[in-house]
Image (cartoon, helix red, strand yellow):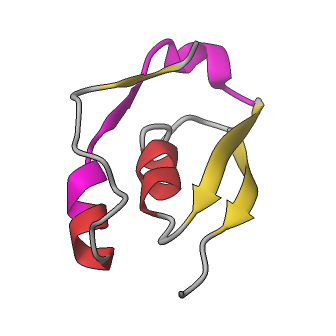
Amino acid sequence: KVVIRSRYTDTQTHKGQYARWENVRNLFACIFPDSLEGKHLLLVDDVLTTGATVVSCADAFRGIPGLRISVLTLALAGES
């Protein structure tokens, strides 16, 4: 485990784009950043809607030397 939630948030399900980004701002924190130096990290998200959660999570790893981040998404949300 290298990332933790810094707080609990409401569901993103019925939020608009701006509200989703605000809801997850600074939501995640990296623990043990030294263990990730020079590594390749895979972030997995079940459904990508605006990308807010993935970006917020990736931001937690900003500044770690040599860290590469890839994202795997299982589904993309479409307009109904």
Give percent across and percent down for residue 75.
72, 61
Give percent across and percent down for residue 71.
72, 52
- Give the left or right position of residue 53, taking residue 26 as reference: right
What stretch of residues is rendered in magenta? 22-38
Which one is nearer the viewer's eye here, 65 or 21? 21
Which one is nearer the viewer's eye here, 37 or 1? 1
- Give the left or right position of residue 71, taking residue 4 as reference: right
Give percent across and percent down for residue 67.
68, 38
The residue depicted at 47 percent of the width and 72 percent of the height is 50
Which one is nearer the viewer's eye here, 10 or 3? 10
User: Residue 10 appears in which quarter of the rendering?
Assistant: top left
Residue 27 higher or lower than 54, as above or below: above
- Give the left or right position of residue 4, taking residue 14 as reference: right
Q: Which residue extends farthest front?
A: 80
The residue depicted at 23 percent of the width and 30 percent of the height is 8
- Which quadrant would the N terminus be assigned to in this image? top right
Residue 53 higher or lower than 42, as above or below: below
User: In the rendered structure, does residue 33 fall within the stretch colored magenta?
Assistant: yes
The residue depicted at 44 percent of the width and 16 percent of the height is 31
Residue 51 higher or lower than 69, as above or below: below
The residue depicted at 30 percent of the width and 64 percent of the height is 20
Give percent across and percent down for residue 44.
69, 42
